[in-house]
Image (cartoon, rainbow, N blue to C red):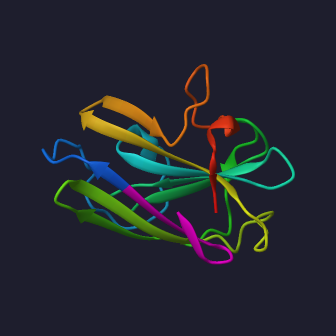
Amino acid sequence: MARPQPRVLALRYRVNDPARALVVPEAAVGERRDNLWKRTCFEAFILIPGGDAYYELNLSPSTQWAAYRFDSFRAGMADAEGVMAPRMEWVTTDSGFELRTLTDLSGLVGLPADATWRVGLTAVIEHAPDQLSYWALNHPPGIQDFHNAQGWTGEV
């Protein structure tokens, strides 16, 4: 993850899958869509500095996407207005796949350009129809929940 510009988030997710067993959603128009997490989907959680509010980005290999704002842990969910459609590229590699994204977040309230953002990167991987596994850079102790900010250990 990187911020090539103060309010632009660049992400690259790599999946090692030389057998190409991953179930990948079909390419689609890169539009906003809910429930992407029910299939292979990559996510980013971004804590708004100084409080409990956060944003969630859902990024599908289909190039569909979603963005949400939460007031606190799983509370006050609403569509995050002001997010431009991310630029996404789904690439087949020798060892599997990569999703490369670039998202302009300058329209989001509360994400200062001059501060470090705390980020959690996660993935929902579909191995077969309706067989999902859940991955994160860090799972905090207890019940695995991507919305638990204790697991958001990335900084950008």
Where is residue 30 shown, x and y percent of the image? 40, 67
Q: Residue at x 40, y 56 (%)?
A: 13
User: In which quadrant is the C terminus drawn?
Assistant: bottom right
In the figure, 122 relative to 103: above or below?
Answer: above
**In terms of depth relative to the viewer, which is nearer, 74 or 136?**
136
Numbered circles on residues, count: 0
Find the residue positioned furthest to the left. Answer: 19
Q: Residue 31 lies in what quarter of the image? A: bottom left
On screen, residue 104 versus residue 20, left or right, reads: right
Q: Is residue 18 magenta?
A: no
Q: Residue at x 15, y 48 (%)?
A: 18
Extreme-right residue of the structure: 50
Residue 150 picture location, percent across and down: 68, 36
The residue furthest bottom is 5
Query: In this orientation, which residue lies closer to the viewer: 21 or 109?
Result: 21
Q: Position of residue 47 (x, y in %)?
A: 72, 51
The segment highlighted magenta reads 1-13
Where residue 135 appears, x then y in whole percent?
A: 44, 37
Residue appearing at x 43%, y 47% in the figure:
36
Q: Kindly tell me whether residue 62 is visible in this rendering.
A: no
Query: Is 135 drawn above or below residue 109 in the view shown?
Result: above
* Residue 87 seen from this side: yes
Q: Is residue 77 left or right of residue 135?
A: right
What residue is shown at x 68% (from left), y 64% (from top)?
81
Q: Is residue 76 above or below residue 11?
A: above
Query: Principal SS element in the magenta part?
Result: strand
